[in-house]
Amino acid sequence: MELGKVEKLIKKYEEGKTSLAEEQQIKNYFSHHDVPAHLEPYGWMFNYTAAAKTETFHREIPPVGKSQKKNYLWMSIAATIVLAIGIFIYQEKDNNSGLNKMGMTSEQEMAYNQAKQTLLMVSGYMNEGKEELVYIKEFNKTANKYINLK
């Protein structure tokens, strides 16, 4: 095939206007001929796609033996024991955290409740101040109308 014809087919290929027969001609050219230096990247592309079509995927599932089943058994037993210990420790911590021996709340919990009340009060005042900002927005809209008219 002539070099000029190949270049025209490649240009057509890049525009997406080639037929399957024309694409096959291009693939045959790059697989059977000595390719000029300026067309080498196209040769690599067409040769790669031709090679990729022949590749297949074979998934091999390894057999599960008795030793692996025993490992799963021991791992599940160990996980159950760790989970039971974690639940026991969490319940003990939960029982002791709320009240001390005299039935009083701890200092940390009292400080947390006080901070929570203070923040709620501040939030209330901030929300009251925010309501007044609606009037400023309306004023800005009106001012912008008059500024844009000039």
Image (tube, rainbow, N blue to C red):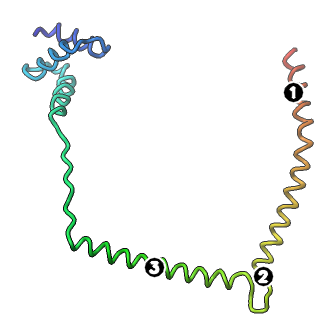
3D distance between C-alphas at marks 3 and 2: 32 Å
Q: Residue type at mark 2: give it.
A: Glu
**Residue placed under numbered mark 3 in the picture:** 82
**Residue placed under numbered mark 1 in the picture:** 141
Q: Nearer the viewer, residue 69 or 131?
A: 69
Q: Is residue 129 above or below residue 99?
A: above
The first of marks 1 and 3 along the sequence is 3
Q: Residue type at mark 3: give it.
A: Val
The first of marks 1 and 2 along the sequence is 2
Question: Between tags 3 and 2, which lies in front?
Answer: 3
Q: Residues within 10 Å of mark 1 (few under 14, many from 20)?
A: few
- Residue at point 88%, 61% (across, down): 121
**Residue placed under numbered mark 2 in the picture:** 107
The first of marks 3 and 2 along the sequence is 3
Residue 37 circle label: none
How far across and down, in percent of the image, does residue 137 sit?
87, 34
